[in-house]
Amino acid sequence: MVTPADGESERHDAEHWAGLEEACAALVQAMAEPLTAIGNYLEAARTLSHRDAAAVHAQLGEILDKAHEQVLRANGVLHEMRQVLQKKKA
């Protein structure tokens, strides 16, 4: 037999899981783009590394700079999510 307190607890659990699923979906979406970009930049750098060194140097530096920007972007997303989680705990 379910008491009103049990029903309230189940509703709270369901709301908690719904919120958690929403947060996870947001994190996956926010992280997918910079991680894909990083992979693309690294693949381009790997392709360039097989070419003549003199022609590659400037291009390789630019590609690595762009990959680094995406790493910082992904780190920013994680930082924002961490802040959201800390606010929810408070």
Image: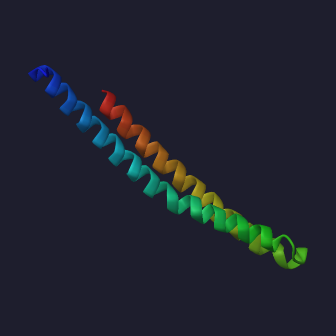
Residue 66 is situated, as x and y percent measured from the top left of the image, at 63, 65
**Colour scheme employed for the rendering of this structure:** rainbow
Residue 33 is situated, as x and y percent measured from the top left of the image, at 51, 63
Give the residue drawn at x 47%, y 43%: 79
Residue 85 is situated, as x and y percent measured from the top left of the image, at 37, 36
Above or below for 36 versus 18: below
- Front residue of this view, candidates 28 and 18: 18
Left or right: where does residue 18 sit relative to residue 44?
left
Count of marks overlaid on the render: 0
- Front residue of this view, candidates 28 and 89: 28
Give the residue drawn at x 89%, y 76%: 54
Left or right: where does residue 47 sit relative to residue 62?
right
Above or below for 13 versus 21: above
Give the residue drawn at x 40%, y 46%: 24
Say which quadrant the N terminus sits in.
top left
Left or right: where does residue 16 sit relative to residue 37?
left
Identity of the residue furthest to the front in this view = 1
Above or below for 28 versus 79: below
- Front residue of this view, candidates 89 and 53: 89
The quadrant in which residue 5 appears is top left
Residue 57 is situated, as x and y percent measured from the top left of the image, at 82, 72
Give the residue drawn at x 46%, y 53%: 28
Above or below for 20 versus 31: above
Say which quadrant the C terminus sits in.
top left
Left or right: where does residue 57 sit relative to residue 88?
right
